[in-house]
Amino acid sequence: MPLNEIKVLVVDDSAVVRKVLGTMLESAPGIRLLHAVADPLLAIERMKQQWPDVIVLDVEMPRMDGITFLKKIMAERPTPVVICSTLTDKGAETTMAAMAAGAVSIITKPKLGLKDFLTESADELVAAVRAAAQVNVRRLAARAALQAAPAPAAKLSADAILAPAVDTRAPLRTTERVVAIGTSTGGTLALEEVLTALPRVTPGIVIVQHMPEKFTAAFAERLNKLCQIEVREARHGDRVLPGRALIAPGGRHMLLRRDGAQYYADVIDGPLVNRHRPSVDVLFRSVARQAGANALGIIMTGMGDDGAAGLLEMRKAGARTVAQDEDSCVVYGMPKEAVKRGAVEKSVPLTSIHREILQQLAAR
């Protein structure tokens, strides 16, 4: 067995899913299927024999649900987990709970036409497993500990105290400030940490988080309940307003459009860009052209290079540009590529990103 093989455990109560996923993974170079089992209790027994590098996990299963199993794994021995979830509203809500518990990415499966769908999604699955294998497990462990600990009361109120000091002046600006954020693997928890730290009065924020259709709406709804700012899935023509964060819908691109001194989100169809839809590069390029020096671009944890070229365009257009630093990333792929291309003005820890956003309230 090659030393660098990625060892994968599949946990799903559907025999069809186990068979199809197993075949897809076994045929991928550099990946070895350890086991494909029907529920978490069987998985625990197999893991006593050999621990996987990556777990592909369903969330709705008999005997023990996927979220309970995920929390157990994260508490005992944090391991990258790719969620394989049904593309339904209920499935999206459950999957968001799994992402909050530490899962790193999502693969969708429909209720009908399952075998054909999974076969067509082979490249996506293999890419997700390879990305998960590169996750910084130390950061996963830190996130798991944070999720397990009681939420400190100060987090709900400390930043709220800052709001009155900057509240009244922001609407008087002739040109509003815009913050554009791009992220992928590990981004759901990272975005939660950033957005929950913001007071009610912030610059308008537009976000691309690589995520499938339906899941972005559930993700935005979850964040909206946790944050002082408004967070929602973007709709075509939405105003980009102070105190509002718009998340690009899964399966569609989002662009920034300027009309006078106001900014709007355009949600459009189109081909995959950098193998993604929505694409960070698409958003960042539109921000460079429409907002220029009135923008802040932030690239965060994620696999691949989506966003690096667009962030460079933003910097050349006069925008401030920031990357999440390597130590705080779950996967230091997207920020690393942006730094390599000279697109990044400075790199900061995840805990400092909200302060970079608040600086956009001040005139340049």
Image: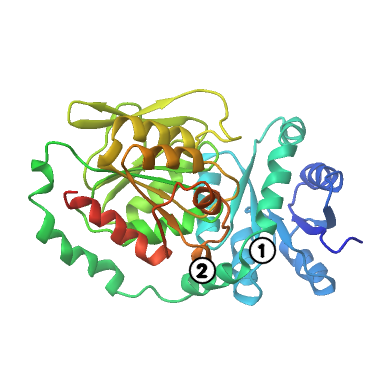
The location of residue 273, given as percent across then percent down, is 56, 31
- Mark 1–mark 2 Cα distance, whole angstroms, equals 23 Å
**Depicted 327 relative to depicted 266: above or below:** below
Q: Secondary structure at mark 1?
A: loop
What colouring style does the render use? rainbow
The location of residue 284, given as percent across then percent down, is 41, 37
Q: Where does the N terminus fall, quadrant-wise? A: bottom right
Q: Earlier in the sequence, mark 1 or mark 2?
A: 1
Residue 180 visible (yes or no) = yes
Q: Amino acid at mark 1?
A: Met
**Depicted 338 relative to depicted 143: above or below:** above
* Most foreground residue, 99 or 189: 189
Q: Nearer the viewer, mark 1 or mark 2?
A: 2
Residue 224 image label: none
| Residue at x-position 27% and y-position 74% | 154
The residue beneath circle 2 is 143
Considering every residue shown, the one lying at the far right of the view is 1
User: In the image, is 183 to the left or to the right of 305?
Assistant: left
Residue 64 image label: 1
| Residue at x-position 79% and y-position 65% | 42
